[in-house]
Amino acid sequence: MPRALSDVFKEEKNKLENQPIFLYQILNVDNAGTVLYLANFDEDIVFASNTYSKFPIAHEKVSEDSTSILNQVTLKISNVNRLIEGYLQGYDLRGCEVNIVLVFKENLANDDDSLKDIFFIDSYSSSETTVSFNLSSKLDVLEVVLPRRKYSRLHCSWIFKGNECGYSGGETQCNRTWQRCNELANSSRFGGFPSLKSRVVYQ
């Protein structure tokens, strides 16, 4: 079932030039409810009353099965200051929830102008410089599979003329690309994320 996006979020994500930011929440890292708030950005970010510290962190690898359900994401975090290593040594972190939140620099005031995906730490490896987490959308303990939506730059995920697409003109075909959506003067309803970096596909 498609997730509801605010009109402001839709408008911002369809711009070719803006500042998308990924925020990361790592929950209960010490078994006492502590949450790490980290931002893949060059300055601290305040969003939804929480301060996300600027930190070398990014998710890189996305894999999916034949039904396009997300299986795993690789999250890499700097280990230079040993912050994450300390939590690994003390609390292991496997099974911890990780939330990845997409926001835009221009729209941080409204909590609804965001898109959040929920994962769980399945396994990890570490070196002197980097900690790599394998994140799964399935928490095996609860046997729950969470629905996912692919984040593609120039490909629309909506069904042509469906409710999310909203196109009501006379054309009968659409290849669901950014270019075609512009040709149909329907780019405000485009279901992709053209402002995201081209080297990464998010899901």
Image (cartoon, rainbow, N blue to C red):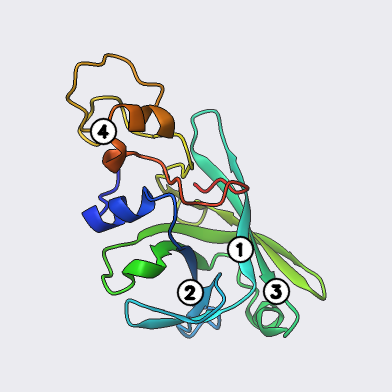
Q: Residue at x 29, y 47 (%)?
A: 3
Mark 2 vs 3: CB contact within 8 A: no
Q: Amino acid at mark 2?
A: Leu
Tell me which residue sits at (31%, 38%) in the image: 187
Mark 3 lies on residue: 78
**Which residue is under mark 2?**
27
Labels 1, 4: front one: 4
Q: Is residue 177 visible?
A: no
Q: What is the three-letter code of the residue carrying label 3?
A: Ser
Foreground residue among 22 and 142: 22
Q: Which residue is mark 4?
A: 165
In the rendered structure, are the residues bearing label 3 and label 1 in contact, judged by CB atoms less than 8 Å apart?
A: no
Q: Quadrant of residue 112?
A: bottom left
Spatial distance from mark 3 to mark 1, Cα to Cα? 9 Å
Mark 2 or 1 closer to N-term?
2
User: At numbered mark 3, what does the secondary structure look like: helix, strand or loop?
Assistant: strand
| Amino acid on which the number 1 mark rests in the picture | Ala
> Considering only order in the chain, which callout, 2 or 4, is on the residue closer to the N terminus?
2
Q: Position of residue 67 (x, y in %)?
A: 49, 29
Q: Nearer the viewer, residue 46 or 105?
A: 105
Image side of residue 102 versus residue 71, left or right: left
Q: Earlier in the sequence, mark 1 or mark 4?
A: 1
- How far apart are the two marked residues, 2 and 3, measured between alpha carbons? 18 Å
Q: Which mark is residue 194?
A: none
The quarter of the displayed image where residue 191 is located: top left
Residue located 50% across and 33% down the image:
68
Marks 4 & 3, CB-CB < 8 Å contact? no
- Callout 2: 10 Å neighbours few (<14), some, many (20+)? many
Whole-angstrom CA distance, mark 2 to mark 1, is 17 Å
Q: Can you say whether 124 is above or below 61 in the image?
A: below
Q: Which residue is mark 1?
A: 58
